[in-house]
Image (cartoon, grey):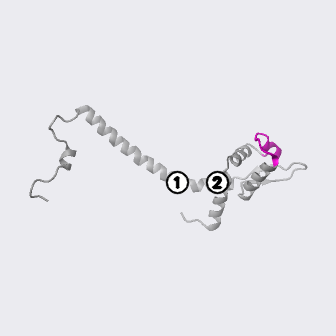
Amino acid sequence: MVMSTATAERLDATFAALADPTRRAIVARLAAGDATVTELAAPFAISQPAISKHLKVLERAGLVTRTREAQRRPCRLEAGPLRDATAWLANYRDYWGESYQQLDALLADLTADADATAATGPPAAGESTPDDEAAAPPPDGWA
């Protein structure tokens, strides 16, 4: 998938902003509704200025906007960058889905082979198996 430089920069900013657990917690809180800096800072053992710094990172990534309502300055989650990140990740979800399907098929083959061996038992002493025959050296003069 080819993407523009602007799109790549937005994704970089989104993932960088979400790399911090405090910022992810802020995003999760804002998903439940708007909140002020004071409300966002309440569950953390860090200062309001530290929360404000985290909010600035989220704002630069386009994940959060601040508005003014009289004396309140609530923060609001913006879903656009999350939607873009989810769309980008969806390509890899398809890749991993295909990989898991291949792994499931291999596991089914191995289970079927194990079940067949359990049903017939191991080969008797001196008895060859198809795998042994495939690995046997060619007779003299055949090379």
Q: Give residue 39's quadrant in the image.
A: top right
Q: Please state which of residues 104 and 123 is positioned toward the viewer in this rendering.
A: 123
Q: Main secondary structure of the magenta part?
A: loop
**Label 2, label 1: how many angstroms apart (C-alpha)?**
15 Å
Label 2, residues with CA under 10 Å away: few <14, some 14-19, many ≥20: few
What's the residue at 16%, 35% (across, down)?
125
35 vs 138, left or right, is right
In reply to whether residue 43 is colored magenta, the answer given is yes
Q: Which residue is mark 2?
A: 83
- Mark 2: amino acid: Arg
Residue 142 at x, y percent in the picture: 11, 58
Q: Secondary structure at mark 1?
A: helix
Identify which amino acid the numbered label 1 is placed on.
Tyr
Question: From what the image shows, is residue 127 above or below residue 63?
Answer: above
Disc 2 secondary structure class: helix
Q: Which mark is residue 92?
A: 1
* Residue nearest the viewer, comparing 136 with 86: 136
Q: Is residue 36 visible?
A: no
Query: Residue 55: percent from the left, percent from the top?
Result: 76, 52
Residue 11, disc: none
Residue 41 quadrant:
top right
Horizontal side of 109 relative to 143 (left or right) equals: right
Q: Which of the 4 image quadrants contains residue 132? A: top left
Return the disc, 2 or 1, that comes first in the chain's sequence: 2
- Determine the residue positioned at 16% across, 52% down: 137
Magenta region: which residues? Answer: 34-48
Question: Where 60 falls versus 116 (above or below)?
Answer: below
- Asked if the stretch drawn in magenta spans residue 142, the answer is no
Q: Nearer the viewer, residue 138 or 28?
A: 138
The quarter in which the C terminus is drawn is bottom left
